[in-house]
Image: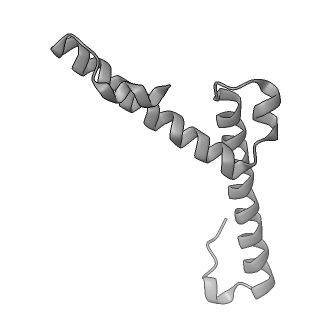
Amino acid sequence: MAMVPMEELPPADFDRSNKGASKQRRDQINAEISVMRDLLPLPESSRQRLSQLQVMSVSCVYIRKCNVLQNLFQCQSHEGELPEAVDFLQ
């Protein structure tokens, strides 16, 4: 298949190509968000009510919480007790 310079492509073909690529990217993003939704440690009924933005937000909060807990427990193993910051987890 020969490469056609972009200047020679009709505008409609270029627009159609961009629309197809955009739709493919949106579909891929939607699929990844769906996977993230399924991985959240929430009841199924709660997960299904979340919008895509909420899924991304809750996922970020969960990852941050895991990082904080990991750091706290690493500190505990070095110092022998949990820092007072654990109270915020209640």
Q: Is residue 43 left or right of residue 90?
A: right
Whether residue 53 is visible to the viewer of this picture, yes or no, is yes
Task: State which quadrant residue 5 falls in.
Answer: bottom right
- In percent of width and height, residue 37 lies at 69, 35
Residue 66 drawn above or below residue 77 = below
Residue beneath the point at 48% across and 35% down: 63
- Residues 80 and 15: in front is 80
- Residues 88 and 46: in front is 88
- Residues 54 and 34: in front is 54
- In percent of width and height, residue 86 lies at 38, 25
Residue 34 drawn above or below residue 42 = below
Task: State which quadrant residue 10 falls in.
Answer: bottom right
Task: State which quadrant residue 4 falls in.
Answer: bottom right
Residue beneath the point at 31% across and 18% down: 73
- In percent of width and height, residue 71 lies at 30, 27
Residue 18 drawn above or below residue 54 = below
Residue beneath the point at 66% across and 42% down: 32
Q: Is residue 29 left or right of residue 61?
A: right
Residue beneath the point at 38% across and 31% down: 67
Extreme residue in the left direction: 79
- In percent of width and height, residue 60 lies at 52, 42
